[in-house]
Image (cartoon, rainbow, N blue to C red):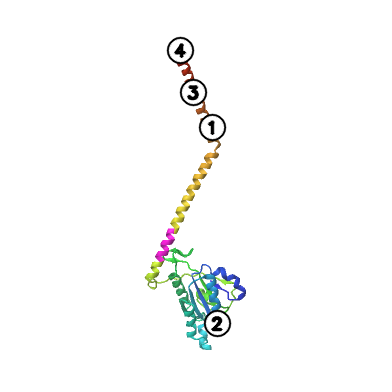
């Protein structure tokens, strides 16, 4: 997901940071003013998305051949350290430099940051995961062209202003050898946590269903006019039989008293 950098789209941003697994904060290597505004975007991300992993991206690396280095590497790395950003990577949507590497890196970093229990929808199974990745930064730094280069595998000069946000879905495969044992253990822990939640929900649903069926059955029995009528007849028969037994006992008692007197 790529969020528009224009100020008039500010009201879009709050909700679209929610649920993100990692954010790429992008600036233009050929425009120092976009680098100078990173602090504003960083504070906005932290305010709306909390302690989410952030990777810093310097785009339009290809322009350095024409314009020279306009933003010193030390200055960039100082920002990385100051804000405790996970990594810094330079890209070029025009040449395709590091575009796939960027998203592979974000997928791996998101995997490393998976929590127990995981966010809703993150885990499909033990080998397949869903991560929401957000590209953020000032306007015209190349967020859209990075996405288009990733999807179409080629650069397009037809620049289109992002109205609010732009979205796409891509599948990435991370080789097993690139996943550390620590990350594998985190994945296993998150999976087990999710499995327990699913089983607990299934058990709760089964109990609620059973209780509902029992209540409905009781209501059906109570509201069945035929059964109510039969119950009344049984009560009448038992009451009538009880009266007969009492009368017989009284008669026998009278007979015994009479015989004893004579």
What crowding class fits label 4: few (fewer than 14 Cα within 10 Å), some (14-19), or many (20 or more)? few
Asked which secondary structure carries label 1, the reply is helix
Asked which secondary structure carries label 4, the reply is helix
The residue identified by callout 1 is 232
Q: Which residues are magenta?
A: 187-196
- Dot 2 and dot 1 residues touching (CB under 8 Å): no
Q: Nearer the viewer, residue 256 or 132?
A: 256
> Residue at coordinates 45% horizontally, 58% vertically from top-left?
198
> Residue at coordinates 51% horizontally, 28% vertically from top-left?
239
Total labels drawn? 4
The residue identified by callout 2 is 36
**Dot placed on the residue nearer the N-terminal end, 2 or 3:** 2
Spatial CA distance of label 2 from label 1 is 88 Å
Q: Percent position (x, y) of residue 62? A: 51, 84
Predominant secondary structure in magenta? helix
Q: Percent position (x, y) of residue 55? A: 48, 76
Asked which secondary structure carries label 2, the reply is helix
**Which labelled disc corresponds to residue 261?**
4
Magenta stretch contains residue 131 = no
What crowding class fits label 3: few (fewer than 14 Cα within 10 Å), some (14-19), or many (20 or more)? few
């Amino acid at each position: 997901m790529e969020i528009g950098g224009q100020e008039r789209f500010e009201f879009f941003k709050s909700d679209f940071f929610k649920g993100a697994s990692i954010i790429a904060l992008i600036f233009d290597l050929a425009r120092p003013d976009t680098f100078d505004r990173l602090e504003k975007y960083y504070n906005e991300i932290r305010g709306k998305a909390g302690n989410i992993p952030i990777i810093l991206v310097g785009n339009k690396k290809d322009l350095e051949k024409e314009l020279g280095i306009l933003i010193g590497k030390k200055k960039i790395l100082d920002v990385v350290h100051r804000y405790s950003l996970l990594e810094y990577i330079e890209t070029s949507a025009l040449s395709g430099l590091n575009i796939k590497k960027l998203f592979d890196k974000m997928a791996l970093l998101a995997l490393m940051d998976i929590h127990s229990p995981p966010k809703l929808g993150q885990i499909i199974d033990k080998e397949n995961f869903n991560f929401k990745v957000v590209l953020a930064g000032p306007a015209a730094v190349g967020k859209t062209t990075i996405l288009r280069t990733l999807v179409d595998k080629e650069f397009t000069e037809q620049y289109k202003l992002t109205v609010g946000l732009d979205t796409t879905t891509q599948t990435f495969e991370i080789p097993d050898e690139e996943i550390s044992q620590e990350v594998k253990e985190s994945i296993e822990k998150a999976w087990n946590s999710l499995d327990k939640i699913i089983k607990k929900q299934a058990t709760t649903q089964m109990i609620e269903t059973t209780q509902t069926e029992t209540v409905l059955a009781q209501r059906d029995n109570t509201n069945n006019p035929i059964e109510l009528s039969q119950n009344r007849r049984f009560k009448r028969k038992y009451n009538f039989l009880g009266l007969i037994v009492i009368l017989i006992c009284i008669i026998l008692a009278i007979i015994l008293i009479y015989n004893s007197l004579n």
